[in-house]
Amino acid sequence: MAEANPHPVPLQKVGGPESTAVLLRELVAHLRQSRTQLREEWARRITEAQLLTAMSKEEIFAEATAVYDNYVDVLETGAVEALQDYARNLSERIIPRGVETHEVIGIVLLLRDVLARSLFAKYRQDFDKLSRVLDAYEPAANRIGSTVAVSFVQERERIIREQQEAIRELSTPVLPVRERLLILPIIGMVDPLRARQLTEQLLRGIRTNRARVVVMDITGVPAMDATVANHLVQTVEASRLLGATVIVTGLSPELAQTLVNIGVDLSKMNTVGDLQGGIEEAERQLGYRVVQMIEEPPVQA
């Protein structure tokens, strides 16, 4: 009877980790060798599918080349960091031009289809190997596709947040009109998020301009719920702690009723009917006096 081998050699399973690595290396070599043909095919398919219409054919081909090279690098190394950086950079450039998320996902799926067709053509005489190559390729392709899509969506969300922030900044401007006097005109609906931002901007403006009086005009606010109305009162109190008096102008009967319903003592709030009256009251508190200038008639020669 033959003795058992004390050091058996492990059998490599078809489709195992080592086999997958070998197949991916072979796949990468094929994609690099066919680079010119495949990227041209991909760029043509993008144009035919009417994707990336905001870009010229030359721009599409340039980006297709860069994405293709990154794609192959990830297949070879398994590291997606460089692809993530490129996807974010690409998103920064094409999102402002109107490229939509479905277009980015579409071009990635087209590339996957172009490469898969190339593999079918290469291994059409060996279906067993084709199956093993696709088994190695599919997980990597899925990871690459999700990486590009997620990077694009994250960049789009970042841009949207910045745009919303800019819009909110413009919608609640704190305007210095005289020394120690600020005007805060509020227009449109005020939700809790905007109310918090309004408070932050106002308090920052008071500190920066060393303001003593603030005229807060809410003529353009159509409605305000109890939560936001209470936040308005807290803003007035916070401003007082920084040494600034807030004069509220344009208070409608509906808003006044809301403040009463939540238990605000309106006698503690300095209110004036309109913006002009509020500015006049602010100037009086600051010691300004309006003097009417009478223009003297020219002296006759």
Image (cartoon, rainbow, N blue to C red):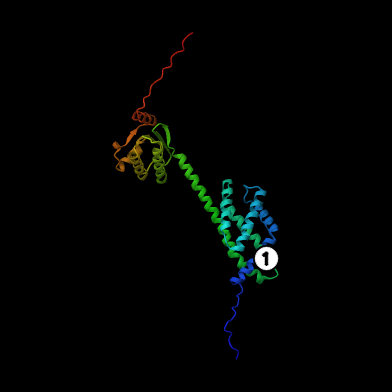
Q: How many marks?
A: 1
Q: Quadrant of residue 218?
A: top left
Could you tell me residue 12's position as x and y percent? 60, 75
Q: In the displayed structure, would residue 87 be above or below residue 173?
A: below
10 Å crowding of disc 1: few (<14), some (14-19), many (20+):
some
Residue 65 x/y as whole percent: 65, 54
Is residue 290 positioned above or below 20 on the image? above
* Residue 286 lies in quadrant: top left
Q: Is residue 221 visible?
A: no
Residue drawn 51% across the image and 47% down it: 160
Is 173 positioned to the left or the right of 9 in the image? Answer: left
Q: Amino acid at mark 1?
A: Phe
Instruction: Please tell me which residue is depicted at 65% across the width and 53% down the height of the picture.
Output: 46
Taking depth in this image into account, of 106 and 278 the one nearest to the observer is: 278
Q: Quadrant of residue 295?
A: top left
Would you place residue 59 above or below residue 180 in this image?
below
For label 1, the residue is 120
What secondary structure is found at the residue carrying circle 1? helix
Which image quarter holds the N terminus?
A: bottom right
Q: Residue furthest top?
A: 301
In the image as oriented, which residue stretches furthest toward the bottom? Answer: 1
Image coordinates of residue 102 in percent, x first then y, are 57, 53
Residue 67 appears in the figure: yes
Q: Residue 135 appears at what percent x and percent y?
A: 61, 68
Q: Nearer the viewer, residue 31 or 179?
A: 179
Viewer-closest of 107 and 225: 107
- Give the answer, above or below, for where 58 lies relative to 268: below
Q: Is residue 298 left or right of residue 66?
A: left
